Amino acid sequence: METATAVKGRKAVAIGYSARKLWSELPAGKRTDGSHFYLTGAGIKLALHSPSEAQPMPAGVTPVMAAADFLSMVRRNVMMHLGGAVADALGVRMHPDMLKWCVTVPAQWGEASKAAVRTAALRAGIITKVDSPQLMIVLEPEAAALHAKVFKSLNMSAGNVFMVVDAGGGTVDVTVHEVEEEAGEVLLAEVVSADGDFSGSTFVDRNFEAFYRHEVGHTYGNSSSGSGPGNSSSGSGPGNSSSSCSSSKTAEAKVLCSKLLLVGGFADSPYLQARIREAFLPRGVEVVVPHRPYAAVLSGAVLYGSHPELIRARRSRLSYGLRACAPYIDGAPGKFWHEAEKCFYTDRIFNAFVSKNERVGSNQEFSHYFTPLYPEQDSCIIELYGGDAVDVPYVDDDSPNSMHKIAELTIQSPPAESVVDDDDLPPLERLIHVGLLFGGTQIGVVAEDCSSGTVQRTRVKFASY
């Protein structure tokens, strides 16, 4: 099914090939008068992650709304199918709570973009709470790697290293994996953090359109007034080729990849296949294009939904840590007077949890202990920061290597005077344990108030990053 949505006004009326058919049968005037729109799946995904690179949304429609409309119609179609022949064959009545949904996203997406997908799924009725385990976010190159593992496209053994290039409509994503083995089970571990660029087929179309306009001039009509199959939205995209992106990732890995797996909708292009082989075959890297490369991510995502443990480890995309306060050190930013301690403090300490490109195991937790800044506090706001730099001591917005705010969370904690073992004893030290799970496709957060023993799985509010 093609991931496209036909929109009438602000309401989605068709998806997939039905959307393409509806659009193709519309009178020309309806395509350009602003009453109908054709949104591609690549366009919606680009808008969720980088609106400046995506086709414009219809007036009053946000990227999350567009994604929610598409997912809502997918859910309705799936439930109609499962409620018919499948339910009769199994002898059960299908219910949405019985399903696990896997939504694939590009490897380069940050936490805010993944959170937007969860919000769209919540609005679509796929899940009933935003952090529901019924929805799994799957990284597309990882899904392709699992597809290759099951269908033995690469014939790899323990210790072998291979690259996955997922060339889609909006992005080209690159991951490098090493094959590991444990108790006879073949597992995959990421060698370097996933990377990618806006180099998908959408941008090839845009750049060709720009080239054609330049060569033909004003005799070429303006197609930007209505988007649809065969028409690209105006603007030009990055000119980086997927081969240059992949070769730079190989250099970063500093390992010898013996094979390259080329997947995604754009991977069907004979020209792209030829250019990839031209770039890598002289280096001794075998280029493998599976049968129906556009379906590799889909089948791999289903496999990940059933067996997420097959991805043993990943590499952290950024350095992550919390902003904290500490007694002032000369030269530190964020200087302020701490009235209770009667001394100067800084509120810009970067308390690192994990460094960029550090290996993190599946479901591995990194944790630290903190204390509230003031005795009378009954809650603490903890801010999660991330960035490309390593060994950064401070969170400083004026620094070129500054960490950016990723998310914030609020932890409830009883005041010091209410936490005592005995009325004659002074208040106990208040400790808050914060654990971050980096091994999954999304960052998980758990907080424990050590004084009361209360454990909170805190909802994180992600910043746009």
Image (cartoon, rainbow, N blue to C red):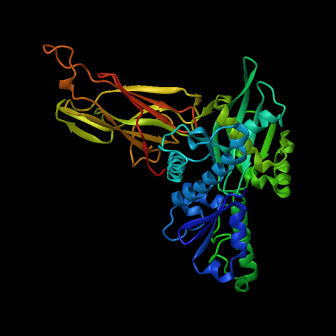
In-image side of 274 versus 385 (left or right): right
Q: Which one is nearer the viewer's eye here, 60 or 145?
A: 60
- Residue 92: x, y in percent? 65, 38
The N terminus lies in quadrant:
bottom right
Name the residue at 57% across, 76% down: 35
Q: Which one is nearer the viewer's eye here, 445 or 158?
A: 445
Q: Which one is nearer the viewer's eye here, 39 or 178?
A: 39
Seen in the picture, residue 242 relative to 390 is either above or below; the reply is: below
- Residue 210: x, y in percent? 70, 73
Q: Quadrant of residue 163?
A: top right
Seen in the picture, residue 172 relative to 16 is either above or below; the reply is: above
- Residue 160: x, y in percent? 78, 29
In-image side of 376 versus 457 (left or right): left
In-image side of 23 versus 259 (left or right): left
Tally of numbered tags = 0
Mark yes or no: residue 416 visible: yes
